[in-house]
Image (cartoon, coloured by chain):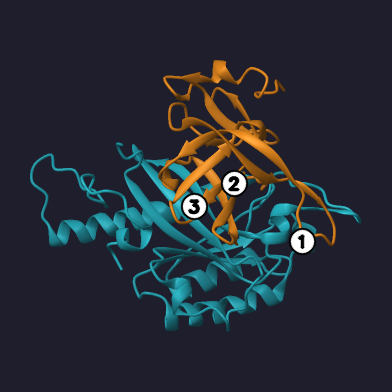
Chain colours: A orange, B cyan
């Protein structure tokens, strides 16, 4: 699978996602083409796999490339985790892999990390 | 921005824990040392999109997934629910017997016109079956609801169940809208006012 962080620019067209955004693991469609806007900022996203008995202090990684979704019902298929503070984490609706991004409760804006998803045709 | 859907339905999956309400095609493996971040915090709800009679329908689905027992599920949980999937495991007699308790709980706490459907899950495990298909059908008739046997493995029928439930909600909604607002020629019935800015799903559930 091509790493989208290497060549992510080709995925952007008019500031939006050119192709469908899918789960890296099961190919479930998360967002259809041209439904999210690209944004570059830094966020520490928890790793998918964590060491046990470390719930209070999950391991994270710096993530900086995001697809921004303003209305949660724009998602084609997605899962929302329970809230952790002001954040809900996003998962694949089918295989529940995640976090693939996060949802900011106060602003109701969702962010999908480019490195946690794949891009392709629906 | 233009709305990307025609209808939004809030659905609940209800039943005993372990009935396999979530259709899982693939899950991250956990072992003695590793766990997944998501399984630790749990999933609140899912959004799924289906195409029904040329309309884009968004389903917002809550799954009790064994975190709760029917005694603890109250009015707040049912608020705004337009459809409820009652799920039991065909290999687990107890989960079938509990459906009656779940229905009683729904009658006491949910809106009276919530659309219900009965699902007998795990039908791929025929050799372990404890609840016959006929008993499922009979129970569904008793409560005047639809019934289907599904398999999380053969996800097609799970999807079919969601389609059926969504279709019934849509039909009920259109009937209600028609009754209160007779359509003029070529008038399109919409569950939501497309001019309005999207607000929370609670305020959009016009039926309830």
Q: Alpha-carbon distance for marks 3 and 2?
A: 15 Å
Q: Is residue B159 left or right of residue B31?
A: left
Residue at 40 percent of width and 71 percent of height: B79
B18 left or right of B163 in image: right
* Quadrant showing the N terminus of chain B: top left
Image height check: is A10 above or below B3? above
In percent of the image, x 66 and y 44: which residue is there?
A: A44
Is residue A103 visible to us here?
yes
Chain identifier of the residue bearing label 1 in the image: A
For residue B149, the mark is none
Q: Position of residue A117 (x, y in %)?
A: 63, 33
Viewer-closest of B19 and B63: B63
Q: CA distance from mark 2 to mark 1?
A: 23 Å
Q: Residue furthest left?
A: B184
The residue tagged 1 is A55
Crowd tier of the residue under label 3, counting other residues whose Cα lies within 10 Å: few below 14, some 14–19, many 20 or above: some
Q: Residue at the spot x=43%, y=84% of the render? A: B108
SS at circle 2: loop
Label 3 lies in what chain? Answer: B
Q: Could you tell me which quadrant the C terminus of chain B lies in?
A: bottom left
How far apart are the two marked residues, 1 and 3, measured between alpha carbons? 34 Å
Is the C-beta separation of discs 1 and 3 under 8 Å? no
Residue A103 position, x and y percent, is 53, 49
Foreground pick, A53 / B80: A53
Residue under mark 2: which chain is it in? A
Q: Which mark is residue A93?
A: 2
Q: Are marks 2 and 1 on the same chain?
A: yes
Element at badge 1?
loop
* Residue position marked by numbered label 3 in the rendering: B162
Circle 3: element type: helix
Q: Give residue A89's position: percent from left, percent from top.
A: 60, 51
Observer-nearest residue: A34 or B113? A34
């Amino acid at each position: 699978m091509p790493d989208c962080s290497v060549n992510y620019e080709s995925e952007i067209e008019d500031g939006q996602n050119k192709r469908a955004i899918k789960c890296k693991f099961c190919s479930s469609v998360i967002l259809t083409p041209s439904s999210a806007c690209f944004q570059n900022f830094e966020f520490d996203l928890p790793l998918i796999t964590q060491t046990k008995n470390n719930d209070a202090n999950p391991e994270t990684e710096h993530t900086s490339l995001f697809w921004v979704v303003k209305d949660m019902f724009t998602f084609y298929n997605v899962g929302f985790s329970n809230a952790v503070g002001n954040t809900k984490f996003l998962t694949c609706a089918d295989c529940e892999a995640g976090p693939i991004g996060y949802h900011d409760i106060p602003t109701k804006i969702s962010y999908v990390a480019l490195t946690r998803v794949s891009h392709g045709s629906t | 921005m233009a709305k990307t859907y025609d209808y939004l339905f809030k659905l609940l999956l209800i039943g005993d824990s372990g009935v396999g309400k979530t259709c899982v095609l693939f899950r991250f493996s956990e072992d003695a040392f590793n766990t997944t971040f998501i399984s630790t915090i749990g999933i609140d709800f899912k959004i799924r999109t289906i195409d029904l009679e040329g309309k884009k329908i968004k389903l917002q689905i809550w799954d009790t997934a064994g975190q709760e027992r029917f005694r603890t599920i109250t009015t707040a949980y049912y608020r705004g629910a337009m459809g409820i999937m009652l799920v039991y495991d065909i290999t687990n007699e107890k989960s079938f017997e509990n459906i009656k308790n779940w229905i009683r709980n729904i009658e006491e706490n949910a809106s009276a016109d919530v659309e219900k459907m009965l699902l007998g899950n795990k039908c791929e495990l025929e050799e372990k079956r404890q609840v016959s298909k006929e008993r499922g059908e009979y129970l569904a008739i008793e409560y005047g609801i639809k019934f289907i046997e599904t398999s999380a493995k053969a996800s097609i029928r799970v999807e079919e169940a969601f389609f059926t439930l969504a279709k019934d909600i849509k039909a009920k909604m259109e009937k209600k809208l028609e009754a209160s607002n007779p359509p003029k020629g070529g008038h399109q019935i919409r569950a939501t006012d497309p001019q309005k800015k999207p607000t929370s799903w609670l305020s959009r559930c016009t039926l309830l």
